[in-house]
Image (tube, grey):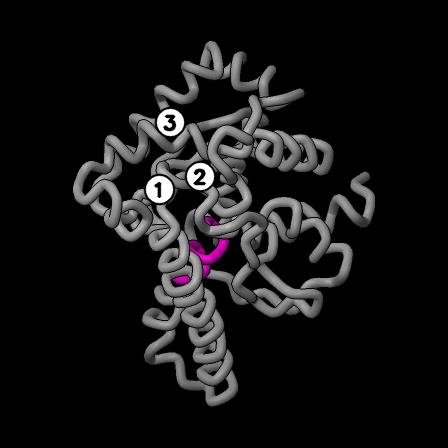
Amino acid sequence: MLDTSRREFLGAAAVLGAAAVATGVTAATPTPATAAALSTIFPGAVDANGVYQLPPLAYPVDSLAPVIDAATMSLHHDKHHLGYVKGLIAAEAAVAEARAAGKFDLLDHHLAKAAFHGAGHFLHCVFWDSIGPVGQGGAPEGDLKKDLDKEFGSVDGFLAQFAASCTSVEGSGWGILGYSVAAAKLVVLQSRNHQLQTQWGILPILCNDVWEHAYYLTYQNRRADYVKAFPQVINWKRVSERYALIRAKV
């Protein structure tokens, strides 16, 4: 039988893990235990009261240069990500208003907005937490290193597949390293926009934002150059810690 904290974690992951890669979120305010579990997967996504927020960066905006320049970091975090937070809050408020009024003629529109903005918000929380200053990211550790070797042959094998996923996703989107709860293994996925072309039941461990706003000031239309440079800013310590905590819970 599952203990209470694990049930809460799995319930939260089912709601917000799906939101991060596939759909919007209209869940009630989480309990403290659930909020703590969620912070493992989507750091800073909600405040202590379960309200969606823009997570602060744990490093200076200029510390990822030349891979990601300071102006891009500021615009990306302070403008683009904040827009997804506001959009998710507004979409959920619109759904609540529709429910209170018993008028659901625009429900599909509001849910589409919740899916888009919710997935954008949660993926960005993982993104900021997965990167850091150039040259300080270390290497994969513990279970993450072991399982990358198992599923992809080596860390280099993973990085090659991850880069191909990031480079080839159509239009704007993401490359995602995720943990499949059902298959109990690591997988690499693409997400077109934030919420399309993904799988249910995948918890994101590491992701790379390949929307043009993530790299255009430095790389213009050369997405492949940005993707090639991206491993220099991966914070493997935080990625390894997130993976270990998720594995301990699921």
Q: CA distance from mark 2 to mark 1?
A: 7 Å
Percent position (x, y) of residue 189? 39, 33
Give the mark nearest the N terminus, 2 or 1.
1
Residue on which the image places disc 2: 207
The image shows residue 125, relative to residue 150, as above or below, that is below
In the image, which residues are magenta? 117-123
Which type of secondary structure does the marked residue at label 1 adopt?
strand
Which quarter of the picture shows residue 142?
top right
Return the x and y of residue 14 as percentages of the image width and height: 58, 49
Mark 3 and mark 2 in contact (Cβ < 8 Å)?
no
**As shown in the figure, which amino acid type bears the numbered disc 1?**
Trp
Helix, strand or loop status at disc 3: helix
Q: Amino acid at mark 3?
A: Phe
Quadrant showing the C terminus? top right
Residue 106 part of the magenta-drawn span: no
Q: Amino acid at mark 2?
A: Cys
In the rendered image, residue 209, in percent from the top left (x then y), is placed at 36, 44
Q: Residue at x 39, y 51 (%)?
A: 70
Disc 2, disc 1: CB below 8 Å?
Answer: yes
Q: Position of 91 compared to 136: left or right?
A: left
Q: Residues within 10 Å of mark 1 (few under 14, many from 20)?
A: many
Q: Secondary structure at mark 2?
A: strand
Q: Residue furthest top?
A: 153
Q: Is residue 120 magenta?
A: yes
- Dot 1 corresponds to which residue? 174
